[in-house]
Image (spheres, grey):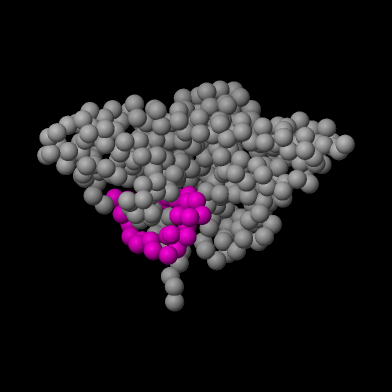
């Protein structure tokens, strides 16, 4: 009998969410099947995913035409399409939400990527999305920028579940956790429930892609074979090392007296969610960002191809706290060869924002074109 390794992850305390959403998989029943048989316990989405789902897909034409006839703007039609997909997916996942007592079963929707440096705009859009979608198992995605941290605190303080996205550095993760804690403290001070779910989305494969490129440039820039070998040995190790150190920071933050006071009031830890888990380098294992980061009270959101690979050949063991000295040594070695990790993480976050801004703009243009095509003569 074939073993579904995704179900094994759940036994180790890690929830599997899927980084994909489209109307096709909802209407066909594929999403419900994945939830009931494969162990999918949540959904993450982003502007790039919705561009892929909506642009050029006739399944949305009827709804777009209805919007055109009603005189809606392109942004209103976009939100109508996306909100409906989020609502339907949330309804499919509601049994998971209920059976897990609100731990899992969430569908994440991101505020406009154009608001990444706008605290007030982010808070306003988060509140509006939450009210419009009107489902208990929706998480609002907010980028982990300086403006985003302030927004996270306020949105959590409003009692709304938050997925903090585009986290690359341990220091930004720490700021995310502290924003969550401050938001819960505001709820507690008002005598309101602090049982609010949140995840901190920590990105992986993009780190290795960028740092491997830097290492390759250093290798080409020297004729010292010993140095070349040492540089080559660091390839493909940065992301997992970084994530393991983030998990240690997580344990530290949720062990102090400040947090215990919130636990007594019913608070739950903000879980680390491993994101960007599809392997970009074909020389690496296609499940390296799953196998190496299994650990309790975590989430791994995977695109469909990584889910299929993991079902087939993941090797599930608790590895998140294995080889911690090696993880620290990798980070130290990268700094030692002249790679400024702090600067790399800043660049990656800005690139991540750009990767959402561009498809968002592209989707709006595609919708405008589609609206013109469907416009009654």
User: Is 362 located above or below residue 35 in the figure?
Assistant: above
**Measuring 66% from the left and 33% from the top, which residue is drawn there?**
364
Would residue 198 be seen by someone viewing this image from the given angle? yes
- Say above or below: 105 vs 233: below
Quadrant of the frame with the C terminus: top right
Along the viewing direction, whichever of 371 and 182 lies nearer the viewer: 371
Residue range of the region highlighted in magenta in the rendering: 296-321
* Along the viewing direction, whichever of 159 and 109 lies nearer the viewer: 109
Q: Image quarter for residue 342?
A: top left
In the displayed structure, does residue 202 sit left or right of residue 373?
left
Query: Looking at the image, is 218 positioned above or below residue 99?
Result: above
The residue under the point 26% across, 36% down is 216
Is 351 positioned to the left or the right of 140 in the image?
Answer: left
Q: Residue at x 30, y 44 (%)?
A: 236
* Residue 166: x %, y % from top left: 46, 35
x 26%, y 52%: residue? 322
Viewer-proximal residue among 99 and 286: 286
Q: Is residue 279 magenta?
A: no
């Amino acid at each position: 009998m074939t073993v579904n390794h995704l179900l094994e992850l759940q036994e180790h305390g890690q929830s599997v969410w899927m980084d994909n959403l489209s109307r096709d998989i909802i209407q066909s029943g594929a999403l419900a099947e994945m939830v009931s048989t494969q162990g999918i316990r949540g959904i993450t989405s982003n502007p790039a995913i919705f561009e892929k789902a909506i642009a050029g897909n006739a399944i949305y034409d009827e709804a777009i035409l209805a919007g055109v006839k009603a005189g809606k703007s392109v942004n209103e039609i976009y939100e109508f399409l996306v909100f409906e997909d989020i609502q339907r997916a949330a309804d499919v996942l509601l049994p998971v939400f209920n059976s897990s007592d609100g731990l899992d079963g969430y569908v994440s929707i991101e505020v406009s990527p154009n608001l990444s440096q706008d605290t007030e705009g982010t808070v306003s859009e988060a509140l509006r999305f939450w009210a419009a979608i009107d489902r208990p198992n929706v998480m609002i995605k907010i980028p982990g920028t300086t403006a985003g941290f302030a927004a996270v605190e306020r949105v959590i303080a409003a009692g709304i579940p938050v997925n903090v996205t585009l986290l690359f550095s341990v220091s930004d993760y720490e700021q995310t956790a502290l924003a969550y804690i401050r938001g819960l403290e505001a709820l507690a001070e008002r005598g309101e429930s602090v049982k609010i779910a949140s995840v901190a989305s920590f990105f992986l494969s993009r780190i290795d892609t960028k740092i491997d490129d830097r290492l390759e440039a250093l290798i080409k820039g020297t004729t010292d074979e010993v140095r070349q070998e040492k540089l080559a040995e660091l390839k493909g190790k940065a992301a997992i090392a970084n994530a393991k150190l983030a998990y240690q920071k997580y344990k530290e933050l949720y062990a102090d007296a400040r947090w215990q006071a919130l636990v007594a009031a019913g608070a739950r830890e903000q879980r680390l969610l491993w994101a960007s888990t599809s392997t970009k380098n074909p020389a690496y294992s296609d499940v390296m960002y799953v196998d190496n980061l299994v650990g309790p009270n975590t989430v791994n959101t995977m695109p469909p191809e990584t889910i299929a690979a993991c079902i087939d050949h993941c090797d599930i063991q608790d590895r998140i706290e294995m080889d911690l000295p090696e993880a620290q040594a990798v980070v130290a070695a990268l700094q030692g060869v002249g790679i400024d990790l702090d600067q790399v993480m800043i660049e990656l976050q800005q690139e991540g924002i750009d990767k959402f801004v561009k498809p968002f703009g592209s989707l709006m243009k595609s919708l405008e074109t589609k609206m013109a095509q469907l416009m009654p003569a």
